[in-house]
Image (cartoon, rainbow, N blue to C red):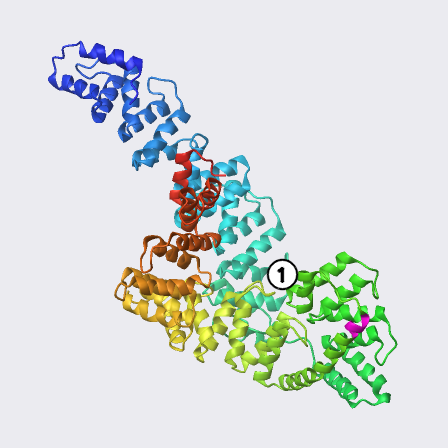
Amino acid sequence: MKILPILISSVMALSSVAYADKAVANLVKRAQQHDVPAMRTLGIRMYKGGSPGIPTDRKVALTWLNMAADQKDEVALVFLGDIYAKGFHTAKNERKAAKFYAEAAQLGNDKAVEAMNKLPVKYALEWHERNAQKKDYDSAIRLAEYYVDKGDGDEARKNFKIAIQANRDKAVKRMAKKDMDKAEIFWRVLADDFKDGDAAMRLADAYGTADGAASNPSEAVKWLRKAAERNHAEAQFRLGQLYLAGTGVDMNRLEAAKWFRLAANQGHENAKMALASCSVTPEVAKPTVPGGNHVEHLRPTKKLGEAAEALRMAWRYRQGGGVGDGPKVIESFRKAAELGHPQAQYALALSHMFGWCVAKDKQEAVKWLREAADRGYLLAPYKLGCCYYLGEGVPMDRQEAERWFRKAAERNDFDALVYFEAHRVITDEKDRETDAAMWFATSAAESESNYQLVRQAESGDAKAQFLLGGRYWKGGDVGLDKREAAGWWSLAAEQGNADAQCSLALYYWGNNGTGGNLPEAVYWFGKSAEQGHDIAQHFLGQCYWMGKGVTMDKQEAAKWWRKAAEQGNAHSQLSLGLCYLTGQGVTMDKQEVYKWWRKSAEQGNADAQCGIGCCFHDGEGVPKDYAEAVKWWRKAAEQGHAQAQRNLAECYYWGDGVDLDEQEAAKWWSKAAQNGDAKAQFCLGSCYKAGKGVRSDDQEAVKWWRKSASQGYDDAIDILNKLGIPME
C-alpha cells in the first residue's frame, strides 16, 4: 500500500500524543497498522469532528479514508462519495462523487447504488451504460431519458427497450407521468417492438389532440389502427367510428361493422350500440364468435374457368399436330392470356419470341413476358431478364436485366440462380429455342391438371379450393397471389375443410397483406384444431401461451399442445415439455419434461435434442449420464444449434463424456460463437489468448471478447476492463 507523505507526518504526530481514552489510542494504533475498519472509522471521525480525543483534521482524514477506499471498503467509499456529492466541508464535485459511489456499487452496496441513481447521468454515464448492458432497469431508464434530452433518438430507443424488458410495469408507470414530448419515443418502442395496444392508443391520442406531439391526423389513424389490431377494444370502437364517418379514412360501412364487432365481442358497450345501429347487410352483421366478420372481405377475385378452358384447347390443338391448327393454337393462347392466365401469357410470349405458329415479334414477346412476370409466373422474370441482357425486344439494359434476374432468383428459379453463380446467360438462340420447346413439351399435362382443379374448385369442391389456394400461395402455373390464395382457402374453410381453416389462420397470423389479424387467426385455428388438425392445435396453443388474439391462458395452451403432441407434432412435444419444466399450465414434473422432449428429439427437433442433453448432463428426469448428454448435444450441434455447440465444446474442454480434446472444444466454441452465442464468444477469445486448441492470437482474442461484451456478457466486459481495452 502507498503511504502518502502527509499521512506519514500525521501518524508520527498522532503517535506522539498520550491518549487519555484507551479506546481512541487503540483505534489509532490499529489504523497505523493498516487495519481497514480502523482507518475508515478514524478518517470519518477526524473529518466530521467532535469526537472526544480525536482532533478535527480533514486533510489527514481524507488520507485515511482514501487508504480504506483503496482496500475496497464500502463505507469509506460511500462516505467519500457523500463528501463530494453534498459539498460537505469541501467543494461540491459530483463527477468525483460518482467515482467513489460507482466503486462501492460494484461491490454490491445498496446505498451507493441509490446514490448513483440520484446523481446527474452525465457524471455517471459509464456506470449506467455498463449496468444497462446487464439489463438493469434503473440505469436503462435514466440513460434513455438522458438521451431524449440530448436529442439522441437511437440511444434513447435502445435503452427504453432494455428498461421495458427489465421491468415493463415500472417503466410504464414512470413514463405515464411524463409529458408526451419526453415520453413519445418510449411509447413508440412499446407499441412497435412490444406490440402494446395501450401504447399505440396513447400515440393515437397524442397525434389526434396535439398533446405534446404535433397534431397529425394520418399518424393518429395509423396508431389507432395498430392499437385496434392488437385487440384494444376502445381503439377498435374508434376506428369503426372513423370508417362510419369517413374521417381520415375512406367511408366503409362494412369495415366500420367489422371493427365495432371486434370491440363488442370484448364487452365494449358503445361498440355494441354502434353495431346495432350500423346499417349493414344481415349477412355481415350476423353474430359470430370472437374474431368478428371472418371472411366476407376474402373471396377469390380471378375467374379462371374460361381462361383455363381456353388454355386447355390451345394445348389440345398443339398436340393434334395439324398444320392448319397453328392459328387456332395462337388464338386460344391469346384468349387465355387476355383473360389473365399467366401460363398462357408465357406460352404466347415464347411463340412470338421464336415465331411458332405466328410471326416472330420480340417486342410482343416482351410485352407478354412482362404480363406473366407481373402475375407471378415463376419462369417469366428470368426470360424477361434475358431480353434486357441481350437487347431482344427492348433496348439492352444490363441493370434492368439484373433486376429481373434478382426477382427470379428470389423465387428460386434455377436458371436465375445459375446466372448469379456463374454470371452468364445462354446467348445462342438455338439453345434457348430448345429450352423453350422442352417447356412446351412438359406443360400440356400441367395445364390439363390445372384445368380440372379449377373446374372442381369453381364448382364448390372444398378440397380443390384448398389445393388451388396452395398453388396461388406457392406460385406456378396460376401465378403468385397470396390474397387470392386466402380467398380460395376462405371458401374451403367455410365448408369445414380443416387444412384450409389452418392455412387461412396462418394467413391472418402473418403479415400477408392483412396487416396481421390475430383474433381472426385464433378463430380459424380453433375451428381447425377442433377437427384434430395438429398444426392448428400447436398454433392455438401458442396464441394462448403468449396472449395473442386471446386472453393469455397457460392451462389452455398446455391443453392444445398436448393434443398436438399426442399426434406426434414435434414442436408441440417440445412446448409441452417446457410447460412441465416451468410448471406453467401443468404441475412441474422433470420426468414428463424428459418424456416429451425425447419424443420431439427423436423426430430431429434440435431444441429438444439440446434439452435432452441437458437432462442427461444434470440428471433431471433421468440418471446423470455425460456420454448420453454428449450424444444428444452432438445431434443438435450438427444442425447448427448454438447452445448445443457450446455445451459440446465444454464437454471436450473438461473431458465430460468424451476424451479431453482442446482442439475439438475450440472447434465447437467457434461454431457456437459464429452463431452468436455470447458465452461461446468469450470462451473462444480465451482460447486464442491462451493458445488452447488454436494458435495464440491476441487480436482474435480481443475480437471475440468484444463480440461477447457487446451482448452484455459480464466475464467479457470484466476482462476488457481489467486489460484496459475499449469495448469497441
In the displayed structure, does residue 45 sit left or right of residue 145? left
Task: Say whether residue 346 is left or right of residue 651.
Answer: right
Which of the pair 633/381 is nearer the observer? Answer: 633
Residue at coordinates 84% horizontally, 60% vertically from top-left? Answer: 395
Q: Position of residue 24 (x, y in %)?
A: 15, 18
Q: Is residue 272 visible?
A: no
Give the percent coordinates (x, y) of residue 511.
57, 63
Amino acid at dot 1: Ala
Query: Which residue in the rendered view is the most extreme toward the right?
Result: 359
Looking at the rendering, which quadrant does residue 274 occupy?
bottom right
Pick the quarter of the image with the N terminus: top left
Above/below status of 174 relative to 228: above
Q: Relative to 278, is 196 above or below? A: above
* Quarter occupied by residue 247: bottom right
Q: Could you say where residue 611 lies in the image, as x and y percent from the top left?
A: 36, 63
- 506 falls in the magenta region: no
Local packing at callout 1 (Cα closer than 10 Å; few below 14, some 14-19, many 20+) is some
Query: Please, is residue 25 above or below residue 420 in the view?
Result: above
Identify which residue, 150 or 380, lies in the foreground: 380
Q: Which residue position is annotated with label 1?
A: 245
Depth check, front residue: 636 or 502: 636
Q: How many marks?
A: 1
In this orientation, does residue 378 appear? yes
Residue plotted at (79% across, 88% down): 317
Please state the extent of the stretch shown in magenta in the rendering. Answer: 429-433
Q: Secondary structure at mark 1?
A: helix
In the image, residue 627 above or below residue 289: above
